[in-house]
């Protein structure tokens, strides 16, 4: 791999928190991403966040929903952030469980400030063309909600990401099959590596060996990855808010 292709950042872009958890477990997560705990039901929601960020006025906060079922869920699992377009008044519990930020309440200023810092770092990565490996791990059928993402869809996502950033998209689809391979590259080009992993598991220790093989193939050097402070201090002039 030429020097110019050495990855400086490995970043989760969803589709659930498993990607962030796996990267952290491998010691590859050096900074927080806006996508870390985000649930995306399709690649177009990811593209929208990349291009438009998060618009505060388009959000609904579960702590403001007075339905008794939601009040109970908030106590059991915490307050969530949902897009207005995802709220179904007749299916509030389902809307709660499909919240796009299931682990974050952006109605809380501390949480909101955290996301503003995440977007600030994302802007620095874009502004200074930091070579980044964007990771999308997909578990089709998880919770009877998640769907697979096709190669064509991931090609579209890769085109958008690489148009905005310097880097590449790695997609890992976790799906058990009868093939003998632990993992397989389905497609690889200058913007995208699309792989399948022969497992349905979302438990890190059960897929650890396979993931380590994949990231060895991607030639990730832990010692070359930039830290939180490295990214934050690239510039003090970029100012990004969740409007």
Image: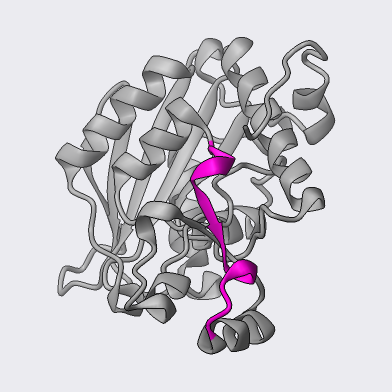
Give residue 180's position: percent from left, percent from top.
20, 68
* Residue 10, placed above or below residue 61: above
| Residue 174 locus on image (x, y percent) | 32, 64
The structure residue drawn at horizontal position 65% and vertical position 87%, both measured from the top left corner, is 76
Q: Is 91 positioned to the left or the right of 128 in the image?
A: left
Locate residue 19 relative to residue 63 in the image: left or right. Answer: left
| Bounds of the magenta segment | 54-67
| 241 lies left or right of 198 | right
Q: In which quarter of the image is residue 40?
A: bottom left
Report the front residue among 212 and 106: 106
Q: In the image, is residue 233 above or below residue 135?
A: above
Residue 46 percent across, percent down from the top left: 40, 41
Q: Image height check: is 162 above or below 79?
A: above
Task: Say which of 182 and 194 sits in front.
Answer: 194
Name the residue at 39% across, 35% down.
48
How many numbered marks appear? 0
Quarter placement of the C terminus: top right
Determine which quarter of the picture holds residue 234: top right
Residue at 53%, 11% in the rendered image? 4
Viewer-closest of 238 and 132: 238
Q: Does the magenta stretch include residue 62?
A: yes
- Residue 215 location in percent, x, y? 49, 45
Please identify the residue farthest to the front as the structure is shown.
Answer: 66
50 inside magenta stretch: no
- Displayed quadrant of residue 88: bottom left
Foreground of the two, 198 or 135: 135
| Snapshot colouring | one colour
């Amino acid at each position: 791999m030429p020097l110019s292709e050495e990855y400086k950042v490995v970043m989760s872009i969803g589709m659930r928190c498993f990607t962030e958890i796996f990267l952290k477990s491998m010691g590859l997560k050096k900074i927080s991403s806006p996508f870390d705990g985000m649930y995306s039901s399709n690649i177009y929601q990811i593209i929208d966040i990349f291009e438009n960020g998060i618009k505060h006025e388009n959000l609904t906060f579960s702590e403001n929903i007075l339905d008794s079922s939601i009040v109970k869920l908030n106590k059991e699992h915490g307050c969530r952030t949902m897009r207005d377009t995802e709220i179904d008044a007749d299916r509030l519990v389902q809307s709660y469980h499909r919240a796009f930020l299931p682990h974050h309440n952006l109605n809380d200023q501390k949480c909101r400030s955290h996301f503003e810092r995440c977007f600030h770092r994302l802007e620095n990565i874009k502004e200074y063309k930091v070579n980044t490996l964007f990771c999308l791990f997909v578990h089709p059928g998880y919770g009877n909600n998640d769907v697979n993402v096709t190669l064509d869809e991931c090609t579209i996502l890769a085109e958008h990401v690489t148009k905005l950033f310097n880097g590449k998209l790695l997609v890992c689809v976790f799906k058990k099959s009868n093939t003998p391979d632990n993992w397989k590259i389905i497609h690889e080009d200058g913007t995208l590596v699309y792989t399948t992993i022969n497992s349905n598991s979302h438990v890190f220790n059960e897929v650890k060996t396979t993931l380590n093989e994949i990231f060895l193939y991607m030639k990730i050097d832990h010692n070359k990855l930039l830290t939180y402070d490295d990214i934050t201090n690239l510039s003090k002039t970029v100012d990004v808010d969740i409007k």
